[in-house]
Image (tube, rainbow, N blue to C red):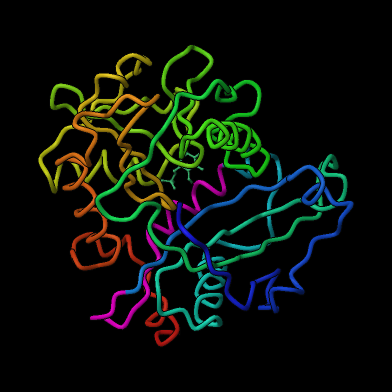
Amino acid sequence: MSTVHELPYVWLNGTLVPRAEATLPIGSAAAFYATNVFEGIRAYWNAADGELYCFRLDAHLRRLRESMKMMRFTIPYRDEELVAAIGDTLRGNEVRDDVHLHLVAYVLGSGLEATAPTGVYINARRRGRMTPPGTGLRCCVSSWTRTSDNAIPIRLKCGANYQNARLALLQAKADGYDAPLFLNRFGKVAEGTGATFFMVRRGQLITPPVTSDVLESITRDTLISEICPRLLGLEVIERDIDRTELYVAEEAFFCGSGYEITPITSIDRLPVGSGEVGPLTRRITEAYMNLVRGIDRRYPEWRTPTYRQAAAA
Ligand code: PMP
């Protein structure tokens, strides 16, 4: 898995503060129950443009608002203010490199008040790819079940959901795997701990539907709506996936803002296809990485510039 390097400053409720001063009250719902919702967003350095591009900020902010609605709280910032705050965080840390940032909206007090006091922080870290190029993850089907929509919904991106992920990830590592793959309450394939799942079977790209206890992933949408059909001429089928289909898939990969496109080369110690990174996975990875970095110039509305943003203001 990728290594992470912290940056000196964190944006906390309107100001950049040194990392050590970015703290939460220990008795708050945010610290004690992980009462928060958040987004994980990547920004990519394009050396030729001398620019740092944040990928699909609009979609991330829309999902943040949806998570807050489900969690019944609001924050005192408009989307434009949050976009400006992300820019301030990246420029304040003088980022000229690829980073992954967390935008976290949290609840103070007990968290049970009708109108609870809230806050926001933005924490950016330098972070590379999940696996070295040409390699993939050794996955297992987890014995932990993905939490369900009527219990702790995964559609809602809250910190507490990641306890389900932690249980499965540490179990997988204890058993000698790199990462777990969750089945949902119906025994169908759901997703990874922080990534959506795709596989290739008989040449077709398949991913579970958004009603299978998965996050409504922005990367998944980028692949299904644009990259696969329009740039690569590949249709993606959204349908349930059975566990045994994993064992006879030709290719498999995780996708997500943090995971980007991360190949899976074995599941339950059975090789996926040849056990090497497959050709469709390679093509999709290349198309995705070129698009997010702005080497492929199409979809400019998906890339928010960091330094031009400040110059324009
Ligand atoms: N599922 C979960 C549980 C996640 O945490 C993530 C990462 N946000 C994803 C899927 C992928 O979502 P996205 O493509 O929007 O980053």
Residue 275 vertical position relative to residue 94 in the rendered view, above or below: above
Q: Residue at x 27, y 55 (%)?
A: 133
The verdict on residue 59 being magenta is yes
Q: Which residues are magenta?
A: 46-66
> In front: 168, or 288?
168
Q: Quadrant of the C terminus?
A: bottom left
x, y percent for residue 9: 63, 77
Q: Is residue 110 left or right of residue 263?
A: right
Q: Is residue 41 left or right of residue 22?
A: left
Residue 142 vertical position relative to residue 177 in the rendered view, above or below: above
> In front: 125, or 134?
134
> In front: 50, or 88?
50
Residue 38 vertical position relative to residue 304 in the rendered view, above or below: above
Q: Residue at x 40, y 37 (%)?
A: 196
x, y percent for residue 11: 64, 72
Residue 276's quadrant in the figure? top left
Q: Residue at x 66, y 64 (%)?
A: 121
x, y percent for residue 45: 35, 73
Q: Is residue 13 left or right of residue 299?
A: right
How many numbered marks appear?
0
The verdict on residue 57 being magenta is yes
x, y percent for residue 102: 56, 59
Judged from this view, the residue extending furthest toward the bottom is 311
